[in-house]
Amino acid sequence: KAIQHPDADSLYVSTIAMGDPAGNEDYTEFEGQICRTVCSGLNGLIPLEQMQGRKVVVVCNLKPVKMRGIKSCAMVLAASPKVKEGEIDEDKGPVELVAPPEGSKAGDRV
C-alpha cells in the first residue's frame, strides 16, 4: 500500500513485502506479511492509485535513512524512457515503475 507522506508533498510512503524474515526492528507486519517502509519521491510523477497493490522492483541493499521523519528501508525503482536523439532532456517525461518479470514473488532477485 502507499500513502502520501504527512510532511512532504513530493514523497509517498509505501509498505512493501519483500520476502524478509521476521525479527528486524526496522520492518513491520502488514496483512500477515513482513514489510519494509519505503519512502519514494514519486508523488506528482506517478498517481497514488498506480502505487497500490502491485509488484515493483526494489533496491534492498541500502542503509535505512530517515526521510522527513520516516525511516525508509529500501528504494522503489522507477525509470523514464530514453530521450530521442536531438531532443533535450528536461526531466519532464513520463516516469514508470519498473515491473518485475512475470511470475515473480516477493523476495525474488531480479
Image (cartoon, rainbow, N blue to C red):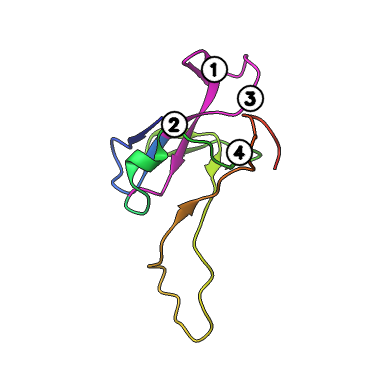
For image coordinates 44% across by 81% down, the residue present is: 88
- Where residue 28 appears, as percent x and y from the top left, is 50, 19
Q: Secondary structure at mark 4?
A: loop
Q: Is residue 10 one of those drawn in magenta?
A: no
Q: Secondary structure at mark 2?
A: loop
Give the crowd class for mark 3: few <14, some 14-19, many >=20 residues within 10 Å. Answer: some
Amino acid type at circle 1 is Gln
Of callouts 4 and 2, which one flags the residue occurring earlier in the amino acid sequence? 2
Residue tagged 4: 63
Residue tagged 1: 33
Q: Secondary structure at mark 3?
A: loop
Q: Is residue 34 one of those drawn in magenta?
A: yes
Residue tagged 3: 19
Please say if the residues under marks 3 and 1 sit with CB atoms less than 8 Å apart: no
Q: Secondary structure at mark 1?
A: strand
Of callouts 4 and 3, which one flags the residue occurring earlier in the amino acid sequence? 3
- Where residue 57 appears, as percent x and y from the top left, is 58, 42
Q: Residue furthest front?
A: 102
Name the residue nearer the viewer: 110 or 40.
110
Q: Which mark is residue 53?
A: 2
